[in-house]
């Protein structure tokens, strides 16, 4: 696995989230923001020589990164905690207690996009500093 492939796809997912934000598809912004963050973290784990496995939990991926001795800033950790559940709740009515498309608005979507951008930017910085 090439870590650069994962970070490139993370950036693409982040761009899709931006396009969807501008189109008013806020539930999909949540999903792609989570995906961008997940792929960025997996990129970093691969960069560190570890197999990230198949998990979608951003907090589990963060734990794996920290076990490798890399400290994750508190703001990035918080972003991961906020973003992680949107893998499920942005897609399934039974997980979000309603229609996902009606559970999000512009403010929520903008916040999730911003958080994902911070995660991706942090990963890129770490990979460039190593």
Image (spheres, grey):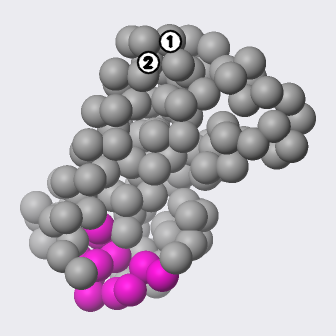
Residue ID for mark 1 = 24
Q: Residues within 10 Å of mark 2 (few under 14, many from 20)?
A: many
Q: Which residues are magenta?
A: 43-53
Let me know if residue 45 is in the magenta part: yes
Q: Position of residue 23 (x, y in %)?
A: 43, 12
Residue ID for mark 2 = 21
Image quadrant of residue 55? bottom right
Quadrant location, the C terminus: bottom left
Q: Position of residue 92 (x, y in %)?
A: 75, 42
Q: Position of residue 43 (x, y in %)?
A: 29, 67
Q: Which mark is on residue 100?
A: none
Res 63 seen here: no
Q: Is residue 104 above or below residue 76?
A: above
User: Residue placed at 10% from the left, 61% from the top?
Assistant: 128
With 96 as the anchor, is 46 left or right in this view? Answer: left
Q: Residues within 10 Å of mark 1 (few under 14, many from 20)?
A: some
User: Residue placed at 30% from the left, 51% from the top?
Assistant: 10
With 93 as the anchor, is 11 left or right in this view? Answer: left
User: Residue placed at 86% from the left, 43% from the top?
Assistant: 94
């Amino acid at each position: 696995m090439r870590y650069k492939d994962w970070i490139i796809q993370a950036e693409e997912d982040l761009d899709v989230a931006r396009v969807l934000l501008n189109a008013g598809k806020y539930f999909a912004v949540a999903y792609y923001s989570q995906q961008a963050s997940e792929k960025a973290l997996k990129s970093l784990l691969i960069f560190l020589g570890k197999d990230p496995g198949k998990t979608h939990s951003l907090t589990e991926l963060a734990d794996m990164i920290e076990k490798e001795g890399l400290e994750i800033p508190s703001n990035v950790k918080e972003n991961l905690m906020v973003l992680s559940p949107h893998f499920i709740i942005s897609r399934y009515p039974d997980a979000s207690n309603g229609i996902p498309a009606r559970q999000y608005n512009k403010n929520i979507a903008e916040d999730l996009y911003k958080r994902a951008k911070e995660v991706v930017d942090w990963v890129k910085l770490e990979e460039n500093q190593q």
